[in-house]
Image: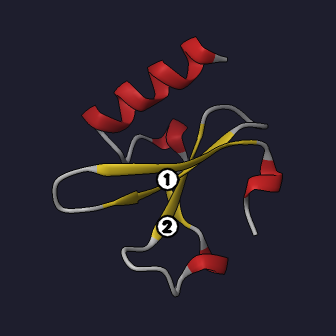
Amino acid sequence: MRVKVKKKLELFIENKKHPSLRYKKVKALKHERPPVWEISIDMDIRITLQEFNDHIYLRNIGGHNILP
């Protein structure tokens, strides 16, 4: 899994709108500021994150149960 996560994070840095990332806002956490987003590592694993001006905060890595 570590290799998959690394590759997807590198892709995210290059092009966060790449279709394989399925980058989207987490609707259940829309009250958070900045908003919480998710990217897909594969069909089972997700990363939730927040983008700040000077950094990206990775909140969680795991299955669908990481989403509220």
- Please tell me in which quadrant of the rendered image residue 16 appears: top left
Q: Answer with mark 1 or mark 2, whichever residue precedes in sequence.
A: 1
Could you tell me how far apart the alpha carbons at marks 1 and 2 are, in whole angstroms? 11 Å
Considering the numbered disc 2 on the image, is that residue within a helix, a strand or a loop? strand
Residue 29 in the image: state x and y as whole percent.
Answer: 60, 77
Residue 30 in the image: state x and y as whole percent.
Answer: 54, 82
Asked if residue 13 lies left or right of residue 31, the reply is left
Q: Which residue is disc 1 drawn over?
A: 23
Considering the numbered disc 1 on the image, is that residue within a helix, a strand or a loop? loop
Vertically, is 34 above or below 15? below
Asked if residue 20 lies left or right of residue 67, the reply is left
Residue 43 in the image: state x and y as whole percent.
Answer: 75, 37
Residue 8 in the image: state x and y as whole percent.
Answer: 48, 28
Q: Which residue is disc 2 drawn over?
A: 36
- Please tell me in which quadrant of the rendered image residue 54 appears: bottom left
Asked if residue 59 lies left or right of residue 53, the reply is right
Q: Residue at x 46, y 19 (%)?
A: 7
Label 1 crowd bin: few (<14), some (14–19), many (20+), radius 10 Å = some
Label 2 crowd bin: few (<14), some (14–19), many (20+), radius 10 Å = many
